[in-house]
Image: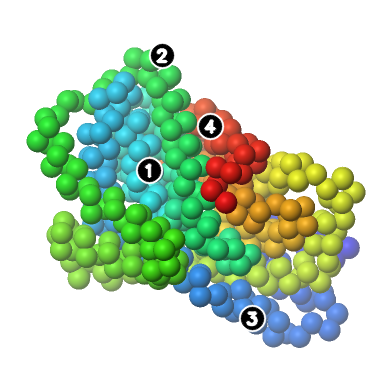
Amino acid sequence: MELALITLLFIGLIILGIPIAFSIGIASLVGIGTMTGAPTTMIPMKMFYGLNSYVLLAVPLFVLTANIMNSGQISHRLINFSIALVGRKPGGLGHANVLVSMLFAGVSGSSTADTAGVGKILIPNMINKGYSREMAVGVTAASSTIGGIIPPSITMVIYGGLTNTSVGQLFIGGMIPGVLIGLGMMFVISIIAKRDNLPKAEKISRVEFISLTKDAVPAMITPLIIIGGIVFGVFTPTEAAAFSAVYAYFVSAFYYKSISLKDLPKIFTETLKLSCLSLFALAAASALGEFLGYYQINAIVSGFFDGMGGNEYLFLFIIVAFFLFVGTFMDAIPAMVLFVPVVYPVALTLGIDPVQLGIVVIITLSIGLITPPYGLCLLIASSIGELSIDRSFKAVMPYISVIVLVLIAVIFMPFILLI
């Protein structure tokens, strides 16, 4: 009865528009209050314990990297290079939109930073060049989801901290699926470009292309340094995040000369705001996890799948369906903190690799970024493009199908994760 009431309370708070972090916190407070003999200090203790992980320091550091990149206009240079590389194809700006999202993902690890940074430039540009608002918004919102899949990825850091899975292995596991999603989206754009006779970008000279390439190289080598450093044991994921922030600043300040010391207070303030939102939700969800553990939710879930025959593929498809539903009204980080500890032990008993489970969960939750009512990337892109949510959602549907196909491939062909 207590569990049902807390669940209804949580859903009711979300319906009322209470921020997800506070909804989780209130549900935790009320839920733990119903536990017999639970001390009043349990909630703050569990909240602090939930953040007591060295790897979680990578979260604000990757957010800082993304903010420095946007302030230092590194995203502009990646966009110019992408247009120069693939812009001559029909629908060239759409292809460039996807490519720059893949490059941006390799530096910042943030889908929302990608949507905001790239969208402010490319959405108006695409509309001015004759692309429909639906096309501009749909491509930008959908391609930005790659930010959580191609390493480095903030959601992978969170998953690794929750399950003690190697973040380096998760980073490696996300590379091929992320690239496949990007190529699949480009294939969709090619079909739409041929159907709608979409324009090409203007041709540039060889000298201009070489100049744009040189301008983008310092930003593009960042993921190689980060992933290479982690794989070869040069530094930990947290140290990699710190390095990426410092590197982004030095490149912006001394190579591009686009930011200075006076810009740092604003960058740090924005970083604190964004980091606090996700980390407070993480802390509150840790407290709620204690309440769920009190009622042995793990055992209930395990018994449910045992009764269904313990089929690993059935389990993964149920996980996909569940996280698709959860992702429509909840951010990826609190969703993982709440439910990954519940499903993770069951996955281990079924022989599912933790990296495969993590990539499946992360890709599934990335779809939630472009599905209403939560759909944060969809909201940002539709706001920039001045397009209604329903028309924006219709525009991303073809790209969602690409993500789903890659997700199915990850389930049935885990070898593509290089594990």
Q: What residue type is labelled 3?
A: Pro
What is the image's colouring? rainbow
Q: Which of 288 and 253 is in front in this view?
A: 253
- Name the residue carrying label 3: 44
Asked which secondary structure carries label 4, the reply is helix
- Name the residue carrying label 4: 402
Residue at 44% of width from left, 36% of height from top?
Answer: 182
Q: How far apart are marks 1 and 4 (CA)?
A: 16 Å
Task: Give the mark nearer the N terminus: 3 vs 4.
Answer: 3
Residues marked 1 and 4 touching at CB (< 8 Å) = no
- Neighbour tally class for label 2: few under 14, some 14-19, many 20 plus, Cα within 10 Å: few
- Neighbour tally class for label 3: few under 14, some 14-19, many 20 plus, Cα within 10 Å: some
Count of numbered circles in the view:
4
Q: Which of 311 and 37 is in front in this view?
A: 311
Q: How far apart are marks 2 and 3 (CA)?
A: 57 Å
Residues marked 4 and 2 touching at CB (< 8 Å) = no
